[in-house]
Amino acid sequence: MNENMNRVLIVTEKMDGSLSDLIRETKGGFEEGRAVEIMYEIVRIYYEYIYVNEEIHRDIKPENILFKRVGKGRVQFKIGDFGLVKSSLAKVFTRGVGTTKYVSPEQLSLIHISEP
């Protein structure tokens, strides 16, 4: 028996870095128009791949938005780190997940919610 048969391997596309890295490269942030373009792209990706599949990422932050340079001045974004993804159809939501620095006040104050 092959000893690797009991392991799960996840293969991903090589990316150039995270949105956090890209922000650092710009030394102060993006121009307003470019920031809007980036946010639009991230929301589009989230909608197409996560929302449509009725899932909630629960840890969206600059470090989990990955990018790859695809042309002169162009970058392609992808969402990474799906360790906290949960079905949006779940009856019970938890608190204490995600990165505290990026968690909304509503999530921080959330008390256990469930349907009877």
Image: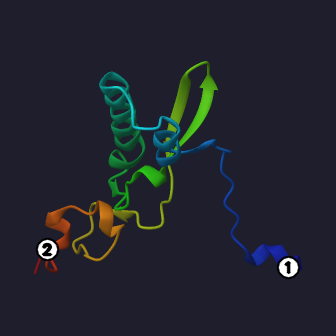
What residue lies at 40% left-to-right and 38% top-to-bottom?
Answer: 28
What residue lies at 34% left-to-right and 41% top-to-bottom?
Answer: 47
| Residue type at the position of mark 1 | Glu
Query: Marks 2 and 1: CB-CB under 8 Å?
Result: no
- Can you give x and y, in whole percent of width and height, for residue 39 in the image? 34, 35
What residue lies at 39% left-to-right and 36% top-to-bottom?
Answer: 29
In which image quadrant can residue 106 be found? bottom left
Q: Is residue 67 above or below residue 82?
A: above
| Residue type at the position of mark 2 | Ser
In which image quadrant can residue 49 be found? top left
**Disc 2: which residue:** 109
- CA gap between label 2 and label 1 equals 46 Å
Q: Is residue 33 above or below residue 98?
A: above
- Can you give x and y, in whole percent of width and height, for residue 46 in the image? 37, 43
Q: Earlier in the sequence, mark 2 or mark 1?
A: 1
Label 1 element class: helix
Quarter in which the N terminus is drawn: bottom right
